[in-house]
Image: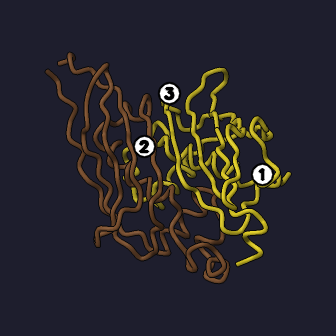
Amino acid sequence: MNAPPPVAPVTRRIDQARVHAYAIAARDRNPIHTDAAAAAAGAFGRPVAHGMLVLALVADALAATFGERWAAGGTLKVRWRAPAVPPVDVTATATLRRCEAGVATYDVACHTIAGEQLLSGTATVPWDEAAS
Amino acid sequence: MTLTFHALRRGDRLPPAQLTVGAAEVRAYLAATGEPAARWTAIAPPLALGAWAIGELLKQLAPPPGTLHAAQEFEFFAPVPIGATLTVALHVVQQAAHRGTNVVVFEAELSAGDTLVQRGRATVAAPLPQQTAGR
């Protein structure tokens, strides 16, 4: 039996410099992420990290474990629960829930060091338990 | 072309876009997210493609004040080599206004030629104008 592997957590600091770099690299220059004045009028009153930047930690953890298998057949389904306000240390986790019908399903989440949940959801990866 | 978020309805299609997956752009994405660059030297990180598809959406659609990216789904169907050019097709699959908030679900389909390589769904919520004016 070839059980799906555990996924090592990924912890990374998300600071304003990283948010600025992500805004350029991801082509998402919404000023609520990078401009204090614009963010002050928004929902959170101050700049917050892109949700996709937080989600990138989950993808990092899964890609580290599954490599090209992740890119060739993975899925993600998440909901953001709270904004990531830089600077903040964020840990992404993926916990195996089940493996059936050739698919490994993981519960995924991101938390701050203080324990606040930033996102939660599920990820799946093709996995053949019968393969050696 | 910039579309109006609150005018969107289910079934609306946005103009398709071309997305070239450049090595420099991949490196910049990985440097920004902190993911190891050595992992993605031949194929593109799939989440980067999803992020750039959202970037294409933002080019066409200025988000109203107070807009939140509430939820996201991705399905990755095939690895995409660095250097590939993809077509991004964007359309509205759900739209509903409830309690002063307009919730729109966008679907992005990324294709390499005739091959669908990725599908993403972004749930975006924005306060309706009368709610914005009241705050």
- Which SS class for mark 1? helix
Residue at 41% across, 33% down: A74
Earlier along the polypeptide chain: callout 2 or callout 1?
2
Instruction: Write down the colour of chain B.
Output: yellow
Q: Residues within 10 Å of mark 3 (few under 14, many from 20)?
A: many
Q: Which mark is residue B60?
A: 1
> Same subunit under labels 3 and 2?
yes
Specify the quadrant of the image occupied by residue A90: bottom left
Is A21 left, or right, of B85 in this rendering? left
- Which SS class for mark 3? loop
Q: In the rendered image, which quarter contains the N terminus of chain A?
A: top left
Q: Quick one: which residue is furthest to the front in this view?
A: B99
Instruction: Write down the colour of chain A.
Output: brown
| Host chain of mark 2 | B
| Residue located beneath label 3 in the image | B77
Figure disc tally: 3
Q: Residues within 10 Å of mark 2 (few under 14, many from 20)?
A: many
Q: Which mark is residue B40?
A: 2
Q: Nearer the viewer, residue B76 or B102?
A: B102
Earlier along the polypeptide chain: callout 3 or callout 2?
2
Q: Which mark is residue B32?
A: none
Q: CA distance from mark 1 to mark 3?
A: 26 Å
Q: Are marks 2 and 1 in contact (CB under 8 Å)?
A: no
| Host chain of mark 3 | B
Specify the quadrant of the image occupied by residue B125: bottom right
Q: CA distance from mark 3 to mark 2?
A: 17 Å
Q: Position of residue A73 (x, y in %)?
A: 43, 29
Is B84 left, or right, of A12 in this rendering? right
Residue at 25% across, 44% down: A95
Is A21 left, or right, of A59 in this rendering? right
The amino acid type found where label 2 is placed reads: Trp
- Which SS class for mark 2? loop
